[in-house]
Amino acid sequence: MTLAFYLLGALAIIGGVITIGAKNAVHAALGLVGTLLSVAGLFATMSASFLAATQVIVYAGAIMVLFLFVIMLLNANQPIAGKDPIPFVRELAGIGAVLLAGAFAIVAFTYKDPRPLAEGAAALRDGSASAVGETLLTHFLLPFEAVSVLLLVAIVGAVALVQRPAPQPDEVPETEALNLPAREEVRA
């Protein structure tokens, strides 16, 4: 069981790397599907069948269909070429990565388990839906809502990043580039 846990954890990390490293938005979405399915497998290895099923149905199913509709609607399935639409985006991403790594290091070295494992497992009553819902919406309401806001920000960010830049005035229109007459001349 431990081997399956580590294997699924490695697959989740690989899917995350594919998600952030893919040049094509559809490939990135498929990497995210792989990550979400791996996380569902992680839940299954921990005997949290309700969370595993919810992960597959809601995130790997419904949310990914929504992402793919947005990608296709915005015609974002083309690889990104040219300069970044947002100035200094790489530098800001680097600073954010360093801050995130620092936060993980602080949490890793200062973490103290708030309660023994047996007590936490008893509170969840074997992962039943009512116990998980009660725990999420009472003790963990703020992190639960923070994740929903994070998903909303990710969707808005994805839409902002795939906006096509307006054509520059020095660019030649297609009709002139191909030596084709303009529409008004064809009708006359």
Image: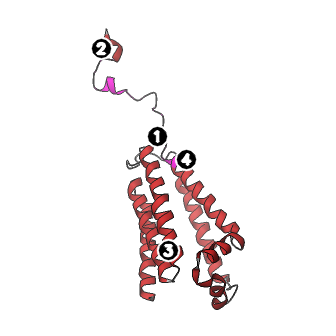
**Circle 1 is placed at which residue position?**
164
Disc 2/disc 1 C-alpha distance (Å): 30 Å
Q: Residue at x 68, y 69 (%)?
A: 137
Q: Say whether marks 1 and 3 touch (CB < 8 Å).
A: no
Camera-nearest label, 2 or 3: 3
In the image, what residue type sits under mark 2?
Val
Residue 180 location, x and y as percent? Answer: 28, 21
Residue 2 location, x and y as percent? Answer: 45, 88
**Circle 2 is placed at which residue position?**
186
**Circle 4 is placed at which residue position?**
87
Mark 1 or mark 3: name the one nearer the start of the chain. Answer: 3
Residue 188 location, x and y as percent? Answer: 31, 8
Mark 2 or mark 1: name the one nearer the start of the chain. Answer: 1
Disc 2/disc 3 C-alpha distance (Å): 62 Å
In the image, what residue type sits under mark 4?
Pro
Disc 4/disc 1 C-alpha distance (Å): 15 Å
Query: In terms of image quadrants, where is residue 41?
Result: bottom left
Disc 4/disc 3 C-alpha distance (Å): 40 Å
Q: Residue furthest left?
A: 179
Q: Is residue 123 magenta?
A: no
Q: Nearer the viewer, residue 132 or 95?
A: 132
The numbered dot on residue 52 is 3
Q: Nearer the viewer, residue 36 or 168?
A: 36
